[in-house]
């Protein structure tokens, strides 16, 4: 009995906290980030704006006493939930209905003449009000038995669903609208189908010779080739680091992870310096064979080189996770029973590696589809979806509909690849169960395979070194693109120039701004991403300790989101199934 | 009681917020080359004490950004970049009307740009279209006319941007149509295509590639070719003998931008001779729009170039553009 009252008083306290936030939001905090031109409220909160004549704020303001009053009597009732839900809906609706240039809805404009002044983006007040309404909705839902009455879980679900709606579903919806709806606002299914099946997306002329293939085909060809090569290289590296007695493993490891942190444009330009028509290797090669230097690197070849360099670290990390997770006792047993190293590798090690290989392949494939920087620098006339989308929007012909259609195709391809990955790996169990500790001697790689692995790894390492050498030297010479190798620090000064004068420190360098922004964005994004990732993972996987029933039903897109967010993007070792030893 | 004290305390605390939100800032969207953008931002900041937050993007990108931010504009001034997207933004009401007191000092072509847009944009510089060649690769008989580019010796050695993605290349298309007539222009482009190694995405990329020897000839705005030459590249800029078109680089104020006051201060300042002289310092040799601005020595002088009477209204309009680009796609782009 006491625990019952204690629980209800704790619920009441929580409700008061949400209501206090709501009060702060609508009474005190400035609703807009910047006041609309012409607005002169006594006070810039929703209350002040409503009093000035922006009548559409009254329901939002009055929701506060209504929720406080109804909540005291029956916070679990439909009335409470209805008010909170309605207020949230109204908050969203008023933002869309009255834009910067006033309202396009006639009755709104007549009812509230001040709406003609328009609305700017919401500030702290609008944001806090939205959060408070969401909190109150979650509160009411929990009291009604949602998530077995667990208020924390209910809030987490409500907020994650809200985040998903705002940042995933809403943009996709806008995208779909741009694809299906013409510029005149009418449904234009015909032009959508026309764009979807346009021959410059799907044609296969490159197989028969002559013209180029369609962009979708180009993207797929690039994705498959790039993923295959990157996976093979990643496997070779992983086997050398995990299965040989090579001394400088740590160096090799560091070197191969280097490209993960380098922006793509830099690598692209370095590749041009090395392999472009006036590039170091092209000129050498042309002199060697007495040929005219060509632009061979532009196109599929160049993009492939850059992408393999960029994605091999990812496949390497995934596969190294898999290699290290294979229980050595199995291999030891195989060898003790008289199997040759080669046979052990192909009968024991390889089958256990397979899911990791699949995961690495699909990951590289998805990365390749999403890559924009390398195709733009090295693509030449080889168009892929990402560049085509970009130029559909920013080009001389502003064609949002076409961009949206292409983006939907890209999204579909990515989702299919992701679905294949989860399906492939989810079907079978690849866990090595022995019931004993992992003690045992890992089989070293058979000699023949070691040779193969080294023969691909050595060129890769040399290539990486060459590319980073160019980047490093290029920073300190006049113009490495023209082979003007006069040493200079002018680029450094351009980037990081500063001055200390009467007004204090003045940063004039071109890089300061972007550096500050980069640091800020990472500092804000990292904890938030981790938080949301952990929450979603907990909600979709965890079971409450008491009853081991699923804690809370998440909609399946949220599950998908959970599985995406709970994997840090750089180092997705958790995708390797052999790691899951639950 | 406690609650009431808390509430009044928070109200008092937040009263101070709106005052602090007004920053002495200017958000500048810049669409010329990075070096010039930076110099403009830096100098303006020094002279006025207004903190400039500058973003450099191509004019197409900036137009797309301003359109995307229509509901909540983040930028104040859009400075630089070819005139067509500025006119398009003006047409759609994305940019604000402003009659600067500096208008009286401008060249007639700059004013025509302002009048065509209902004073929502204004000309800040002009630059003629042409081409540049690498003089270490083309040593004899240098090309002087558009027609010379059809010569077989330039096989696989000419680059120009794709008109779908670049305003420069669209200016070429519109220029040739105005010089030759539409059918003849497409016939010419068809022959030129035999020599073109690559249609680049960015407008100025061909001349950069010519400077590094990746191609022999790049069709670009002449000031871009001059800029490469000034930096020491073996590039010679050519004004084609048949005549050529030009661009009017423009400036617009973003409608509903957060710092409207500062934006107008920048606008007036950017039209002064002193501000326009900064271009040459940043290796940009466009012809400035203020009558009093010094024309950089290296600038391709507009008096000595055969300029056509470029019809910005017709060739900047959406229909003509769509039609010409569609025809380019069908007759030239489809060959690749």
Image: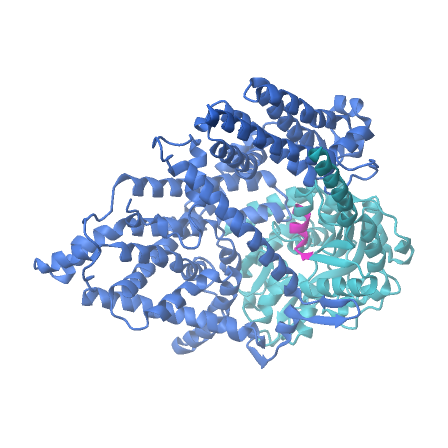
Chain colours: A blue, B cyan
Q: Residue at x 75, y 68 (%)?
A: A504
Q: How many marks?
A: 0
Give left or right: position of B157 versus A102.
left
Answer above or below: position of B72 versus A111.
below
Measured from the top left, where is residue B260 in percent x and y? 81, 48
Query: Which image quadrant is residue B47 in?
Result: bottom right
Out of A439 and B9, give the one closest to the viewer: B9
Image-quadrant location for residue B43:
bottom right
Does the image show residue A83? yes
> Which residue is at the front of the view, B44 or A325?
A325
Q: Residue furthest front?
A: A2
Q: Residue at x 48, y 37 (%)?
A: A197
Q: Position of residue B96 (x, y in %)?
A: 80, 44
| Magenta-drawn stretch contains B59 | yes
Per the image, is A265 magenta? no
Instruction: Report whether A340 appears left or right of A288.
Output: left
Q: Relative to residue B273, is residue A151 depicted above or below?
A: above
Q: Residue at x 15, y 62 (%)?
A: A341
Q: Does residue A404 lie above or below A335 as drawn?
A: above
Which residue is situated farthest in the left direction here?
A338
Query: Is B125 placed left or right of B106 in the picture?
Result: left
Is residue B92 visible from the viewing direction of this image? no
Which portion, as a residue range, is magenta?
B55-64
Residue A248, percent from left and from top: 32, 72
The percent position of residue A290, horizontal first and vertical second, equals 41, 76
Question: Which of A429/A213 is in front?
Answer: A429
**Nearest the eye: A128 or B23:** A128
**Residue located 39% across and 52% down the image:** A572
Left or right placement of residue A313 versus residue A517 in this view: left
Q: Quadrant of the N terminus of chain B?
A: top right
Task: From the image, give the main secondary structure of the stretch colored magenta.
Answer: helix
Q: Is residue B231 above or below residue A386?
A: below
């Amino acid at each position: 009995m006491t625990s019952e009252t204690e629980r209800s008083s704790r619920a009441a306290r929580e409700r008061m906290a949400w209501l206090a936030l709501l009060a702060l939001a609508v009474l005190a905090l400035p609703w807009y980030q910047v006041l609309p031109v012409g607005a002169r409220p006594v006070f810039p909160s929703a209350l002040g704006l409503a009093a000035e004549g922006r009548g559409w704020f009254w329901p939002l303001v009055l929701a506060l006493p209504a929720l406080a009053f109804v909540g005291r009597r029956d916070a679990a009732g439909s009335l409470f939930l209805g008010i909170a839900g309605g207020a949230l809906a109204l908050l969203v609706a008023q933002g869309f209905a009255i834009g910067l240039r006033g309202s396009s809805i006639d009755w709104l404009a007549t009812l509230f003449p001040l709406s003609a002044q328009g609305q700017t983006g919401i500030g702290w007040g609008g944001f806090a009000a939205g959060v408070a309404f969401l909190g109150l909705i979650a509160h009411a839902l929990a009291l009604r038995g949602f998530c077995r009455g667990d208020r924390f879980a209910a809030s987490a679900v409500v907020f994650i669903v809200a985040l998903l709606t705002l940042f995933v579903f809403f943009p996709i919806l806008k995208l779909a609208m741009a694809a299906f709806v013409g510029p005149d606002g009418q449904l234009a299914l015909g032009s959508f189908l026309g764009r979807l099946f346009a021959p410059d997306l799907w044609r296969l002329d490159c197989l028969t010779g002559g013209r180029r293939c369609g962009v979708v085909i180009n993207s797929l060809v690039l994705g498959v080739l790039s993923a295959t090569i990157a996976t093979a290289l990643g496997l070779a590296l992983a086997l050398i680091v995990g299965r040989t007695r090579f001394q400088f493993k740590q160096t090799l490891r560091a070197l191969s992870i280097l490209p993960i942190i380098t922006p793509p444009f830099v690598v692209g330009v370095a590749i041009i310096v090395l392999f472009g028509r006036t590039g170091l290797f092209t000129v050498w090669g042309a002199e060697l064979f007495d040929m005219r230097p060509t632009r061979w690197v532009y196109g599929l070849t160049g993009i492939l080189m850059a992408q393999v360099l960029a994605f091999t670290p990812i496949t390497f990390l995934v596969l190294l996770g898999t290699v290290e997770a294979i229980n050595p006792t199995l291999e030891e047993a195989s060898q003790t029973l008289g199997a040759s190293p080669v046979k052990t590798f192909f009968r024991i090690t390889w089958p256990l590696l397979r899911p990791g290989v699949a995961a690495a392949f699909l990951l590289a494939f998805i990365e390749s589809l999403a890559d924009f920087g390398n195709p733009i620098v090295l693509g030449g006339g080889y168009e892929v979806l990402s560049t085509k989308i970009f130029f559909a929007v920013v080009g001389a012909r502003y064609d949002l509909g076409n961009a949206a259609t292409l983006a939907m195709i890209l999204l579909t391809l990515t989702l299919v690849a992701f679905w294949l990955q989860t399906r492939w790996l989810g079907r079978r169990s690849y866990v090595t169960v022995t019931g004993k500790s992992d003690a045992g001697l890992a089989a070293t790689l058979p000699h023949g395979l070691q040779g193969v692995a080294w023969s691909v790894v050595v060129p890769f390492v040399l290539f990486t070194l060459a590319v980073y050498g160019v980047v490093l030297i290029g920073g300190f010479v006049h113009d490495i693109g023209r082979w003007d190798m006069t040493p200079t620090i002018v680029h450094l000064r351009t980037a990081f120039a500063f001055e200390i004068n009467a007004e204090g420190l003045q940063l004039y360098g071109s890089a300061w701004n972007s550096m500050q922004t980069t640091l800020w964005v990472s500092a804000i994004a990292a904890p938030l991403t981790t938080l949301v990732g952990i929450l979603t993972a907990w909600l979709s996987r965890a079971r409450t300790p008491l009853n081991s029933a699923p804690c809370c039903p998440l909609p399946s897109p949220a599950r998908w989101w959970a599985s995406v967010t709970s994997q840090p993007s750089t180092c997705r070792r958790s995708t390797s199934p052999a790691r899951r030893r639950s | 009681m406690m609650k009431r004290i808390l509430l009044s305390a928070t109200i008092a605390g937040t009263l101070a917020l709106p005052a602090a939100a007004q920053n002495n800032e200017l958000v500048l969207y810049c669409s010329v080359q990075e070096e010039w953008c930076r110099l403009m931002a830096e100098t303006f900041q020094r002279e006025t004490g207004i903190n400039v937050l500058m973003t450099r993007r191509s004019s197409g990108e900036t137009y797309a950004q301003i359109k995307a931010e229509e509901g909540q504009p983040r930028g104040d001034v859009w400075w630089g970049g070819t005139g067509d997207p500025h006119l398009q933004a003006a047409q759609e009401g994305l940019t604000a009307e402003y009659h600067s007191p500096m208008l009286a000092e401008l060249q007639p072509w700059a004013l025509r740009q302002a009048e065509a847009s209902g004073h929502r944009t204004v000309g800040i510089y002009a630059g003629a279209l042409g081409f540049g060649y690498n003089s270490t690769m083309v040593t004899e008989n240098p090309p002087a006319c558009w027609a010379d580019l059809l010569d077989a010796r330039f096989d696989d050695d000419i680059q120009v941007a794709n008109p779908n993605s670049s305003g420069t290349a669209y200016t070429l298309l519109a220029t040739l149509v105005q010089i030759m007539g539409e059918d003849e222009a497409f016939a010419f482009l068809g022959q030129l295509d035999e020599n073109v190694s690559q249609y680049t995405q960015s407008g100025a990329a061909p001349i950069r590639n010519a400077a590094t020897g990746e191609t022999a000839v790049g069709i670009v705005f002449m000031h871009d070719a001059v800029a490469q030459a000034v930096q020491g590249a073996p590039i010679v800029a050519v004004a084609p003998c048949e005549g050529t078109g030009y661009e009017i680089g423009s400036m617009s104020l973003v409608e509903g931008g957060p710092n409207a006051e500062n934006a107008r201060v920048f606008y007036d300042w950017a039209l002064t001779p002193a501000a326009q002289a900064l271009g040459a310092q940043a290796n940009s040799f466009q012809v400035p729009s203020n009558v009093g601005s010094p024309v950089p020595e290296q600038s391709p002088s507009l008096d000595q170039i055969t300029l056509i009477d470029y019809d910005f209204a017709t060739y900047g309009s959406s229909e003509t553009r769509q039609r010409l680009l569609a025809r380019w796609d069908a007759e030239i782009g489809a060959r690749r």
